[in-house]
Amino acid sequence: MAVSRARSEPRWQPDFVVIGAAKAATTWIQARLQENPTVYMPDPEPHYFSTYYAEGEDHYRGFFNEIPEGVTCIGEKSADYLAHPEAPARLARMLPHARLVVMLRDPVERAYSDYKMFYRRGTVTGPPEDYLVDLANPHPRFLEDGLYARHLDRWLEVFPREQIRVYLHEDLDERPREVLAEVSRHIGLEPTLPDTIDTTHENSSRTMILPLPLRRMLAPFKDAARPLRGTPIFEGARSLLAQEMRYPPLSTSLRARLCEFYAPDTQRLGTLIERSLDCWQSARTPIPAQASR
């Protein structure tokens, strides 16, 4: 009797997925998990169950074509899945047993950080008031993505609660080793923690970067320069040109307005995940433009 093709193909489908939220240290947890040699996660975010679902399963599989020997746990991170209205059902159909990891951040800080990322790229040029006053703006994701309870409801409709672990941004500051150990167990691994854990949040808005005109000019050479990153010559040349970005500040009045906007959802989120969210005190604790991550 012929052996089915499916039985002879190597395993590639993810065992776990980090689904968001964007700008909530999902890259940090990805980097720490990738330090475990038994874990494979592609570096780029596939965004398959959100943006590229129409490309088909072969497109998604392309992210898992080079899984090294010794890997026992496969995953991916796409931070936009959490807020995407169709991602939960799509992911559940293909990966019904996947373990999900959610990282959440004070929604006001998250919105401002998302705005700053777009400002850094030159996608937006106006002040926060042009984008964070209400959802009727060119980039509604700035506000929409922080309605965490609304988004989690969709995931809990198609996944058992025990398959979803939720962490706060503050957890990484206060107990990074414990978070990494808990996530490891959640995705089916015995924790193997390094002696020291890098607590630097990836993609920080305080990172020194090249001026936007120069970044645009060098964009065609990005892939060619990738192997040089980290070398003394490359980093030395970069340090001569890079500078810290200066962002339009988030005003006290806009911060208060955002807190009011998010208050009902945040209150329901606390009940949903059974945690106090008193640490999210953006209205009383100003977010300096150059210090917010």
Image: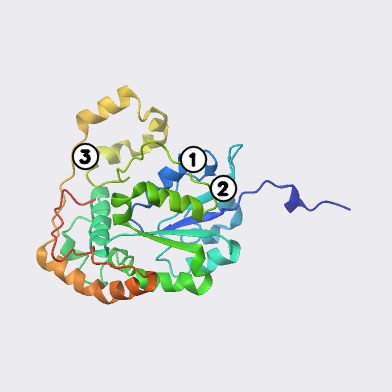
Q: Which of 3 and 189 is in front in this view?
A: 189
Q: Which of 73 and 52 is in front in this view?
A: 73
Separation of residues labelled 3 and 2 (CA atoms): 39 Å
Mark 1: give few (<14), some (14-19) or many (20+) Cα within 10 Å.
Answer: some
Q: Nearer the viewer, mark 3 or mark 1?
A: 1
The mark that comes first in sequence, 1 or 2, is 1
Q: Nearer the viewer, residue 76 or 156?
A: 156
Residue in the picture at 53% in, 48% down: 189
The dot on residue 211 is: 3
Residue in the picture at 27% in, 46% down: 204
Horizontally, residue 143 falls left or right of residue 284, namely: right
Q: Can residue 123 be seen in this view?
A: no
The mark that comes first in sequence, 3 or 1, is 1
Name the residue that disc number 1 marks.
36
The mark that comes first in sequence, 3 or 2, is 2
- What SS does tag 2 mark? strand
Q: In which quarter of the image is residue 257?
A: bottom left
The dot on residue 13 is: none
Give, as a three-letter code, the residue at label 2: Cys
Residue in the picture at 50% in, 66% down: 162
Name the residue that disc number 2 marks.
73
Give, as a three-letter code, the residue at label 1: Asn
Separation of residues labelled 1 and 2 (CA atoms): 10 Å
Horizontally, residue 248 falls left or right of residue 263, namely: left
Residue 255: where, in percent of width, then height? 16, 65
Q: Quadrant of residue 225?
A: top left
Circles 3 and 2 in contact, beta carbons < 8 Å:
no
Q: Which residue lies furthest to the top in this view?
A: 233
Circles 1 and 2 in contact, beta carbons < 8 Å:
yes
- What SS does tag 3 mark? loop
Residue 127: where, in percent of width, then height? 15, 59
Residue 168: where, in percent of width, then height? 33, 59
